Amino acid sequence: MIKRLKYLLIGYCFCLAIPSLAQDSLNLEKYYPKPKNYKIQFFIGPSLNYLKKGNEDGRNNRLNKIGYSLGIGVTRNIGKRFELNARLSWERKGYKQDYFGAVDTVINGVKQPWLSGTITNDITIDYTTFSLSPQFRISKNFTISSGVYISSLQKAVEVYDFFYPTRHLFSFNALGGYEDVDYGITIYLGYSLNIGKNLSITLQLLDNIGLKQIWKFYNMGFPPKYNNSYSMQIGLAYSIKRTCNYIFKPINN
């Protein structure tokens, strides 16, 4: 280990000495890499969630469910117009479904159809999600991106809104009914506006398309279920510019 450190120290001193030996004006970019720009972003925003596929039976109607996401992201320049974005977020997804429940109640020998009604099932599913996306900068302010995400299931709750004999809510922990991992493709369009030297506001429109079947009981006669969500996120980004500290200044003749 000591021997390796010795060689590294000698190499570093040699690199620092090169500019001082030159007689002409020096361009230090020959000896040092170009600065690397990073952005740290905090974001939050609402989402519209639904299932791409699946119907328990012909009576069910899939309804959109409002959720949200929040988290932190890091972006690094990898070219003039290309960037790499990594994000870690908390996402609230899920879906709703309505169906008509017929109750064959008989009173004094007469059926009572008025006791039948609509049952609403509200499913909330929480994930911790990591995504990785290459970005292409269309212009100074606009970027487009396509990448992948993987999510870890944190919480699942189902709430039933019953109508009989009186209206009441019944909820239970549904964590055991859904797969622990979800993954898919993420696509988004971003806009950024500078509000300071290193500070900018960002607005992103995202579409997370689930590719993994998330319902554990789909092979028991139920169709598969896939997550899908549209999100609008507003964020605050801080730019960090990594530069070299030059000991020697260029020599101008």
Image: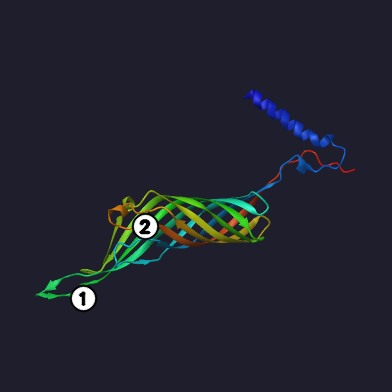
Quarter of the view holding residue 114 = bottom left
Quarter of the image holding residue 136? bottom right
State the quadrant of the C terminus: top right
Look at label 2 and name its amino acid: Lys
Q: Residues within 10 Å of mark 2 (few under 14, many from 20)?
A: many
The crowding category of the residue bearing disc 1, from other C-alpha atoms within 10 Å (few below 14, some 14 to 19, many at least 20), is few
132 lies above or below 45: above
Q: Residue furthest top?
A: 3
Discs 1/2, front: 2
Q: Nearer the viewer, residue 252 or 147?
A: 147
Looking at marks 1 and 2 on the same chain, the residue that comes earlier in the sequence is marked by: 1
In the rendered view, tell whether residue 56 sits above or below residue 11. below
- Colouring scheme applied when the structure was drawn: rainbow
Please report contact status of discs 1 and 2: CB closer than 8 Å, yes or no: no
Q: How far across and down, in percent of the image, does residue 16 sit?
A: 77, 35
The extreme right residue here reads 253
The amino acid beneath tag 1 is Trp
Q: Marks 1/2: CA distance?
A: 33 Å
Residue 47 appears left or right of 37: left
Q: Nearer the viewer, residue 24 or 148?
A: 148
Q: Position of residue 153 (x, y in %)?
A: 40, 50
What residue is drawn where x is 77% and y is 41%?
Answer: 30
| Near-viewer residue (15 or 242) | 15
**Does 138 sit above or below residue 27?**
below
Provide residue 113's location: percent of width, then percent of height: 19, 75
Left or right? Give the position of 197 relative to 22: left
Which residue corresponds to mark 2?
225
Dot 1 falls on a residue whose secondary structure is helix
Name the secondary structure under disc 2. loop
Q: Position of residue 208 (x, y in %)?
A: 48, 58
Q: How many marks?
A: 2
Q: Which residue is mark 1?
A: 114
